[in-house]
């Protein structure tokens, strides 16, 4: 109703030059955090949280949330340049971003990724501004059965997505589930598959796997192929930003779809990582350029980036109105709110309007600031690819190792990272896709505990998955997605095209 | 092992000092002379964002803001296996005075439920910082006004009532089985990831009740979406300031008052590895006393409706022994002990 006037008051809060300064500091730190794999947004925010106690809560959350935006932007950089996702939600960005960089189009990919991120965030903030109360009620509808249905949908939409044979996709996914099961059983609290080795009780962290599978695996592969980056010929042209912008408008459907998927996943809360995968999968299926996905298609960068950033932004809504964090970083921000004496919940919007609207206004300006910061660095980052591989490779390995260590402060994780690197290399050589493994490792735990909770609620009856319209329609959609390969295989046969080798 | 000779040495040093007429140096002042010589690691046996993590980062912020330590204090999360990772780290750091850990009930429950080789006596207790309260909550649309009514309805429901809680075989589930054992009612327990998810399950009617900490539910209570029935403490919460239009924390009856014979409080305490010098323990006790005196800490305690008991030394040890026995008893009866 009076959201607009509240928002204008919010911009007033930002008039304080100190707040603008905190915003730029936050964005810059965030981009750095996003670039370094392992040091995720959650860790970054957690480390800086105690430093903010001397600020006002509004300034503090503006700075911390800007770190978060920065990390969302920054995660794409290493994904595109080196095939190493800096953050979990940038895994899907590697699928097309890295091939683009190899073709010497790194600048285009980076510009596309940043601009898409910005677009996704913008859509999410607009929804946040005008629909917050409605959306909060929608999130309440999601119990264990509904959440499992969302996860099922993510898995199912993935099975038919790759160009690899479905068997290989499922094998890779099952390997991911097996790894996700190591550690602690979420429902009974008992240890499993640790074989009496207590180092395993924290399970396999998804970030370690990603750093190893993608980062180290890629280095091994490049070494075999002759110690050269294919992107070496990258042209450094500051005008690349404008040239890319001219191309982007034709992907508006994909961008809009990605933003909607992202908002939905952020609010439910499913998280930015599944959102980016789902958006990529949908785009691949629905776009007429779908068959080119995985070979360096700009649209394949737009899809996951819009979704990831929209999800990351809208994840703050359930945090503010319900006190449930939609992402690990939101969980830390939530802790910050409590420490500053702000109580997230249905009354926060009424009792702390200055704080809430200041934060929302900062999302608008913070994302504009973020876009400016990252776009100016595009030529700089693209230039990294011109450094000879023999110099940059050891640097990447060190960054990967430090990142793997940072996740849990455990030396053993660095060994796991190397093992994952070898697995990643073997997978690529044998043409098994890595993404389903990663997806299963991210969502496996959550899907399992939601499924088992749903079973406890229904006394073991599967009928809970069509017990109401919401859960029934999500499950139905999931089945359609699962059976899609059958249709598309039929179509492909009709068109007479042979299946192609996937790009790395 | 090195503890005795060292304190004997200190005592004799004090004696000698006394003999030479500088007798003003008391033994305790001499003990307080240990100081960290490098960064102190503050382990949180839980993930980022949870209650223990918030408290640790609050303490880190207070220490920094008031300059209570010369060296820095760094929070490190080791939450794997319900905190087992953090506890094993403390066990392996024998004699290291630059490591402290904040504990919650998982200090007792995790080793019992998972079988990891750790016992609270493998660490050195420093101080009890506070106790966390638990409250029985129902959705405000439900007809139950007292704990007694709710438990009777749950009994009549024959196991169809759903209790949502944080984690598995941890405090929330222990309270649930305690409630079952005390009343004969049966609940379906669903394990959620964090207190916020638990609160949401209740507001969204995916659960019939929860035992959330005050801070996890207060905003929904104030918004009229949930209702507190009783507090699992042997006395009422002391905060008399109105939280909703007509109720303060102190207006919530204890569960015993409402005829439900159970209480449970969760330890928020500080431990160190085994075999650390006694003067190092004294240093940290002194540090946390200073933290407790800051206005930030007191406000934090009031916001979360904590029980602000503080204990150290033998008093703390005997409290711990009793709490360990209670947990073992409850978990044995519930069949939660890992084979």
Image (cartoon, coloured by chain):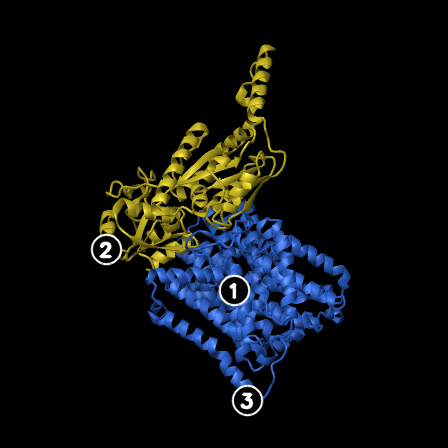
Chain colours: A blue, B yellow
Of B126 and A248, the residue lying toward us? B126
Query: Cα distance, mark 3 to mark 2?
Result: 62 Å
- The disc placed on residue A170 is none
- Left or right of A352 on screen, residue A54: right
Answer yes or no: are tags 3 and 2 on the same subunit. no
User: Which quarter of the picture shows residue B9?
Assistant: top right
Q: Are marks 2 and 1 in contact (CB under 8 Å)?
A: no
Nearest to N terminus: mark 1 or mark 3? 1
- The disc placed on residue B143 is 2
Residue found at x 53% / y 41% = B60
Disc 3 marks which residue? Answer: A494
Query: Cα distance, mark 2 to mark 1?
Result: 42 Å
Relative vertical location of residue A7 with respect to residue A164 in this rendering, above or below: above
Residue A331 is at least partly visible in this image? yes
Task: Where is residue B153? Give x, y as percent.
Answer: 23, 53
- Left or right of A250 on screen, residue B178: left
Residue found at x 64% / y 69% = A428
Task: Where is residue B242? Give x, y as percent.
Answer: 32, 44
- The disc placed on residue A440 is 1
Element class at badge 1: helix
Which quadrant is home to the C terminus of chain A? bottom right
Chain containing the residue with disc 2:
B
Chain containing the residue with disc 3:
A
- Left or right of B246 on screen, residue B332: right
Of A471 and B202, the residue lying toward us? A471
Residue A373 is at least partly visible in this image? no
User: Which quarter of the picture shows residue B278?
Assistant: top right
Residue found at x 57% / y 88% = A495
Which quadrant is home to the N terminus of chain A? bottom left
């Amino acid at each position: 109703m009076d959201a607009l006037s509240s928002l204008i008051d919010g911009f007033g809060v930002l008039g304080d030059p100190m707040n603008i300064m905190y915003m730029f500091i936050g964005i810059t730190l965030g981009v750095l955090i996003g670039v370094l794999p392992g040091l995720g947004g959650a860790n970054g925010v957690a480390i800086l949280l105690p430093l903010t106690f001397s600020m006002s809560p509004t300034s503090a959350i503006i700075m911390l949330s800007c770190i978060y935006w920065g990390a969302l932007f920054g995660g794409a950089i290493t994904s595109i340049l080196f095939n190493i996702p800096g953050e979990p939600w940038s895994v899907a960005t590697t699928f097309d971003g890295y091939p683009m960089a190899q073709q010497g189009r790194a600048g285009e990919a980076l510009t596309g990724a940043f601009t898409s991120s910005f677009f996704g965030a913008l859509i999410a903030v607009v929804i946040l501004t005008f629909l917050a109360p409605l959306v909060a009620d929608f999130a309440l509808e999601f119990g264990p059965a509904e959440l499992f249905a969302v996860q099922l949908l993510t898995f199912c939409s993935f099975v038919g997505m790759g160009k690899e044979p479905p068997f290989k996709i499922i094998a890779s996914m099952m390997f991911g589930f097996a790894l996700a099961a190591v550690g602690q059983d979420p429902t009974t609290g008992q240890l499993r598959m640790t074989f009496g080795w207590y180092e395993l009780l924290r399970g396999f962290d998804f970030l370690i796997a990603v750093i190893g599978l993608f980062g180290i695996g890629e280095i091994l592969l490049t070494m075999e192929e002759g110690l050269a980056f294919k992107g070496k010929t990258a042209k450094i042209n500051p005008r690349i930003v404008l040239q890319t912008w001219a191309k982007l408008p034709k992907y508006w459907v994909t961008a809009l779809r990605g933003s909607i998927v992202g908002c939905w996943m952020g609010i439910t809360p499913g998280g930015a990582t599944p959102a980016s995968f789902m958006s990529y999968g949908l785009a691949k299926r629905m776009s007429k350029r779908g068959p080119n996905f995985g070979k360096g298609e700009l649209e394949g960068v737009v899809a996951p980036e819009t979704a990831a950033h929209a999800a990351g932004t809208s994840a703050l809504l359930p945090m503010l109105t319900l006190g449930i964090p939609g992402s690990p970083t939101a969980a830390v921000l939530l802790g910050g709110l409590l420490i500053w004496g702000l109580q997230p919940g249905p009354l926060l919007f009424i009792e702390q309007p200055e704080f809430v609207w200041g934060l929302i206004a900062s999302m608008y300006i913070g994302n504009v600031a973020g876009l400016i910061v990252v776009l100016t660095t595009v030529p700089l980052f693209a230039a990294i690819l011109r450094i000879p591989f023999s110099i940059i490779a050891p640097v990447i390995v060190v960054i990967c190792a430090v990142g793997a260590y940072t996740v849990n402060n455990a030396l053993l994780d660095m060994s796991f990272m190397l093992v994952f690197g070898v697995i990643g290399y073997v997978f690529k050589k044998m043409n098994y896709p890595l993404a389903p493994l990663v997806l299963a490792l991210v969502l496996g735990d959550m899907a399992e505990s939601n499924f088992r909770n749903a079973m406890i609620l229904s006394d073991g009856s599967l009928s809970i998955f069509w017990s109401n319209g919401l859960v029934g329609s999500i499950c139905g959609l999931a089945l359609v997605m699962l059976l899609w390969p059958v249709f598309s295989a039929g179509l492909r046969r009709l068109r007479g095209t042979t299946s192609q080798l996937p790009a790395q | 092992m090195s503890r005795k000779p060292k304190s004997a040495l200190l005592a004799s040093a004090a004696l000698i000092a006394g003999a030479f007429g500088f007798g003003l140096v008391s033994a305790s002042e001499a003990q307080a002379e240990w100081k960290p010589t490098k960064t102190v690691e503050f382990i949180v046996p839980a993930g980022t964002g949870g209650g223990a993590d918030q408290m640790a980062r609050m303490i880190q912020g207070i220490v920094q803001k008031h300059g209570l330590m010369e060296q820095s204090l760094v929070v490190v999360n080791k939450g794997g296996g319900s905190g087992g990772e953090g506890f094993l780290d403390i066990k392996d750091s024998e004699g290291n005075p630059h490591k402290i850990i904040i504990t919650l009930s998982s200090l007792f429950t995790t080793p019992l439920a998972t079988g990891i080789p750790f016992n609270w006596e493998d660490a050195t207790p420093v101080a009890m910082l506070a106790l966390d309260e638990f409250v029985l909550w129902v959705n405000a649309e439900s007809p139950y006004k007292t704990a007694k009514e709710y438990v009777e309805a749950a009994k009549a429901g024959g196991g169809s009532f759903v209790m949502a809680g944080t984690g598995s075989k941890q405090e929330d589930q222990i309270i649930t089985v305690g409630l079952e054992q005390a009343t004969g009612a049966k609940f379906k327990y669903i394990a959620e990831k964090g207190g916020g998810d638990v609160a949401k399950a209740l507001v969204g009617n995916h659960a019939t009740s929860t035992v959330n900490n005050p801070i996890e539910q207060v905003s929904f209570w104030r918004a009229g979406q949930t209702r507190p029935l009783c507090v699992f403490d042997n006395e009422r919460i002391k905060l008399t300031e109105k939280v909703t239009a007509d109720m303060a924390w102190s207006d919530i009856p204890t569960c015993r008052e409402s005829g439900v014979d159970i209480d449970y409080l969760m330890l928020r305490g500080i431990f160190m590895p085994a075999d650390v010098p006694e003067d190092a323990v004294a240093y940290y006790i002194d540090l946390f006393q200073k933290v407790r005196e800051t206005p930030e800490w007191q406000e934090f305690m009031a916001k979360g409706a904590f029980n602000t008991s503080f204990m150290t030394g033998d008093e703390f040890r005997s409290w711990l022994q009793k709490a360990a026995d209670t947990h073992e008893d409850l978990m044995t009866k519930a069949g939660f002990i890992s084979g």
